[in-house]
Amino acid sequence: MQLTHIDLGQLSIAAVNMRHGKRAPDISDILPSIRARGVLVPLLVRPNGGPDQFEIVAGRRRYVAAKTIADEQGEVDPLPCAVMEPGDDAAALEASLIENIARLAPDAMSQYESFVRLTKLGRSVAEIAATFGITERMVGQRLALGNLLPKIRDAYRDEEIDAETIRHLTMASKAQQKEWLALFADAESSAPRGYQLKQWLFGGQSIATKVALFPVEDYPGPITADLFGEDSYFADAELFWQKQNEAIAAQRDGLLAAGWSDVIILEPGEHFRSWEYEKTPKGKGGKVFVTVSHRGEVETHEGYLSRKEARRTRRDDPTDGDVAAAKPSRPEVTSGMQNYIDLHRHAAVRVALLEHPGTALRLMVAHAIAGSGLWSVKPEPQQTRNEAIAASLAASASDATFAAKRGEVLALLGFSDEEIAVIGGNGDDAGTAGLFVRLLALPDGDVLRVLALVMGESLEAGSAVVEALGVHLKVEMGIAWQPDDAFFDLIRDRQVVNAMLAEVAGKPVADGNVAEKLKTQKQIIRDSLAGTNGRTRVEGWLPGWMQFPVRAYTDRGGLRIAEHWARVRPLFAD
C-alpha cells in the first residue's frame, strides 16, 4: 500500500464500491468538517487503467464532499489516498486505516502540537506519517502551522478561521500576519479570507517602503504615500527589486564575513520550513537562510542545518548518509540468453492467441490506440488551408456527432476529455499493455464501440476505402450534408455548373442560361433550392459528387474519388 495525495480529477468511483450508484450520497454530516479541516482519512483507491487514473474502492462520501467544495470554491487540495497494490485485501486495508486514524486527534492544532513534539524527539516526517497512517504531505501541512503567529493558531483552534484561509496564512510573512490580525480583530474592518486573502497576499504590485533593506533616500524613482503620510510605496517595482537585490547581496556578504558557514537565499516566494532543519550554532557550522516574499519582505533564519547535515556534524563524519556509488553488478543473463528467452516466450504466446480471437481484438485495439514498437497508427488530420472549408466542416452535423461519440469513448477508457483524438499514442510498451488490460474488463459491445471510433479516426480522407465503405453502408449524404456557401464558391467549371442547374431547375432553364456567367447560374441554383426570387423550391437535391457511389459530370477526369470508385466497383456485386 502506498500513501499519497491525488488530484480530484484523477479519481472516479469504482463500480465495485458497495455504495456505487447513480444517486448522490447524503454528505450533510461530513461536509462542514471537510469544509473546515479538509479530508483527513485517506480514501482507498486502486489504479484504473488510464495514465494516473484511480478508482475509489472506499471513501465515496469523502470524495463527493470534496467535489462539492471544489464546485463552491473553484479548487480543492489533492485528497489523501491509500493506493492498493495487487493482492491487497480492501476490507483489511480500510480497517487498518480507520484504526490508525482513530489514534490521531481530529483537531488540526492538536495534531500540530503532537507532530512538533515528535520532531523534537528526532522523528522524521516520514516516520510520523507511517505511525498515523497518513501521508507525508499531511504531516507537512500540520507542521506548517508553526509559521503562524500564536493568536492566529488559537483562532483556528476555536474554528474562527477556516482551513483555506489558514492555508494561505501559512504562506504569509510575519509582518503580513500581524497586518491581517489587526483587520481580524477590528470589528469595523473585514479581514480577507479564502481566495480574497490569496489576492491580498500576492495580487498587487505595490511594495511598501518599510520592507526596503536599503535607505529609502537612495531609491531614485517616485514614491507614493497615502493622505496621512503614514504608509508609502515604491511606484517602480522593477527599480525597487534592483536596489533590494543589491542590499540582499550586501547582507549575504556581511553574514559570511561574520563567520557563518554559508548563506542560502531562497527563491522569491519559497518558504523556510523550520521543521526540516535543526538549530545549529555558528561554531558548529550553522547556516543562514534568507527568504524573500513577493511583496519584497526579507527574513533571515540564522543558525540552521538540515537534519541530515546535523547528523553528520554530530558524528563528525562528512560521509554519513551518503550512498556510495554502487558497483555495477553482473546481469543475471547474457544478451544472448535474453534473446533466447524473449523469442521462445513470444512464440508460445502468439500460438495461444490464435485460440482467443476476442482477446486478440482487444489487443489490436490497444495497439491501434497506444502504439508499440511495430504499430504506429495516426489519426486523419482533416487538414485544409481554406478557412471556408474548415468552417463548413466544423459546422456539419457529422463532425459534431463524431466529436460527441469520441467523448464517450474517452470516458469509457478513462482518458481525459481534453484529448483531441483517441489514437496517436507514443508507442510506450507498458502503456499499451495497461490499455489492453483495461479493454479486457470491457464487454464486447463496448470494445466494438471503441474499435469503430478508432477506425473512424484513422480513416484516410479521399481514399478508395471511404468510397467502398460509403457504398457498403449505403450512406445517405442528404441527411449528413446540405449545400453551403463554401460548396458553391468552390465550383469553377461552367459545364459542371450548367449540368447541376439542369438537375435542379430543369434542362430548359439550364439551356436558357447556358451562356450566362457562372455567378448567375449558381444564383439560380441557390434560388431553386431556397424557393426564392420566384423559383419553385426543389427539395432533396444531392450533387453527383456527394452521392454514394460517386457520379462525375464530365468525361474529362480529375475527380479522384470517381477514379477510386472505378477501381473498387468490380468488387461489389450488382
Image (tube, rainbow, N blue to C red):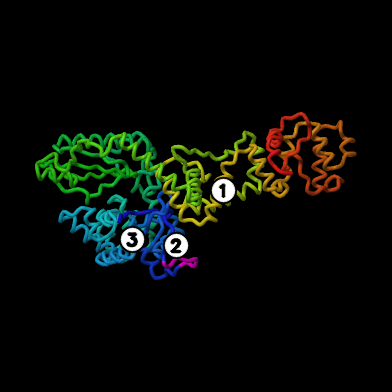
Front-most of residues 519 and 416 = 416
Residue depicted at x 67% and y 40%: 467
Q: Looking at the rendering, which quadrant does residue 237 occupy?
A: top left
Query: Which mark is nearer the camera, 3 or 2?
Result: 2
Which residue type does callout 2 highlight? Ala
User: Which quadrant is the N terminus positioned in?
Assistant: bottom left
Which residue type does callout 3 highlight? Pro
Q: Is residue 160 above or below residue 494?
A: below
Whole-angstrom CA distance, mark 1 to mark 3, is 37 Å
Residue position marked by numbered label 3 in the rendering: 42
In percent of width and height, residue 226 lies at 38, 47
In percent of width and height, residue 119 lies at 19, 55
- Describe residue 305's horizontal placement relative to residue 21 as left or right: left
User: Which quadrant is the C terminus positioned in?
Assistant: top right
Q: Residues within 10 Å of mark 2 (few under 14, many from 20)?
A: few
Instruction: Looking at the image, tell me whether mark 1 or mark 2 is earlier in sequence order.
Output: 2
**Circle number at residue 15:** 2
Query: Which mark is nearer the camera, 1 or 3?
Result: 1
Highlighted range, magenta: 18-24
Q: Can I make out residue 21 in this image? A: yes
Q: Residues within 10 Å of mark 3 (few under 14, many from 20)?
A: many
Circle 2 — which element?
A: loop
